[in-house]
Amino acid sequence: MIKRICIWMLAMVPVALWAQFAPAQDKPGTTAMHADSSAFVAWATGCKVERGPMRIDKPENGLASYGADSLALGMPGGTYDVVSLGDGGFAVLTFASPIYNGPGPDFAVFENGFANAMNPDTWALELAFVEVSSDGLNFFRFPAVSYVQTETQLGNAGSIDPSQIHNFASKYGAFYGTPFDLDEVEDNDLLDKNKITHVRIVDVVGNIDPEYANTDSEGHVINDPWPTGFASSGMDLDAVGVIHDLAHFDVPENVADDITLYPNPVKDRLNVKAESLQTVEVYNLMGQMVLSTTTATIDMGSLNQGIYFVRIAADGKTVTKRIVKQ
Ligand SMILES: [Ca+2]
Ligand SMILES: [Ca+2]
Ligand SMILES: [Ca+2]
């Protein structure tokens, strides 16, 4: 009987007590990615912020205002080189080349968090949801989870143990990016995970009052430092680093040794060397076919400079190669 009670009591302990995600950037097992990592091949090139209020419960106090949208572009700049979103505000970022779902994480988000000197396991972090879109209209959210306690509101000097949160932007401190793997977003017909053109960062209000609270993908209320009723209210976006984009897509070459394209880079005339050539199709980075032919030369002269994919059907197989148009 006692044994049975113990098992029953164990089952009643909230999962949160032992649920652990990757720890802080200074601990073994962290997933934090330093800004200098060679994994980053590009950075956001466009950013449009819709600010939220400094305090969601006092909209008459005005909107957050710290930083310019452009401070989220390029590499992270650290503490002051950020744009503040305000309570529930958001930023939409765009990129020179679409992001695709490669092995492991595909991009990373940077904030300006810092360690809490009074409590070494916790960090001053202002959380945000991360969403992706392949058309700029329909956005899909990474399933974020927070096991931060919801008994007591974290004040504006509050801090969070990164191992209690997952899939929030700003899990890590300044210059350390939080990685996001497109595999973790639920599939949807309106989302092409191999052509992500927009990333939206949405501030988590963090107020645990049910009137204002945001919830995570499992329905938990999310507690983060609040109120932050000043110009730099809310999440402070520093940068979005790209790990997999189509401009750096490595096309498998394994079966293609007997099919070659030259010259590459090409200015106008592209030559295809292949046995039993059937078709040659040229696609731009948006996946649109821009040229096609059945001959072994193709005139690229009319195309804009940039990266293209050439799909060649020959000798009963199809291969795709990346070329640069100058
Ligand atoms: Ca991935
Ligand atoms: Ca917040
Ligand atoms: Ca802030």
Image (cartoon, rainbow, N blue to C red):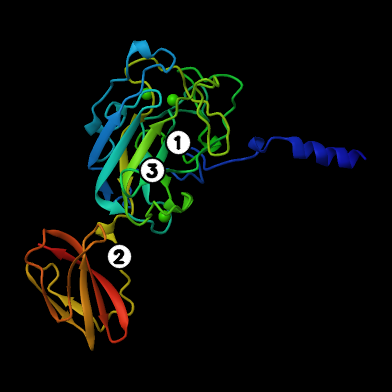
Q: Amino acid at mark 3?
A: Phe
Q: Which secondary structure, mark 2?
A: loop
Q: Residue at x 49, y 17 (%)?
A: 155
Q: Quadrant of the C terminus?
A: bottom left
Q: Which secondary structure, mark 3?
A: loop
Q: Quadrant of the N terminus?
A: top right
Q: Which residue is mark 2?
A: 250
Q: Residue at x 37, y 55 (%)?
A: 192
* Residues at circles 3 and 2 in contact by the CB criterion of under 8 Å: no
Q: Residue at x 58, y 32 (%)?
A: 220
Q: Amino acid at mark 2?
A: Asp
Q: Position of residue 113 (x, y in %)?
A: 40, 29
Closest to the camera, between mark 1 and mark 3, is 3
* Residues at circles 1 and 2 in contact by the CB criterion of under 8 Å: no
Q: Is residue 321 left or right of residue 206?
A: left
Crowd rating for badge 3 (residues with CA inside 10 Å; few <14, some 14–19, many 20+): some
Closest to the camera, between mark 3 and mark 2, is 3
User: Is the residue indicated by label 1 positioned so its CB lies within 8 Å of ligand 2?
Assistant: no
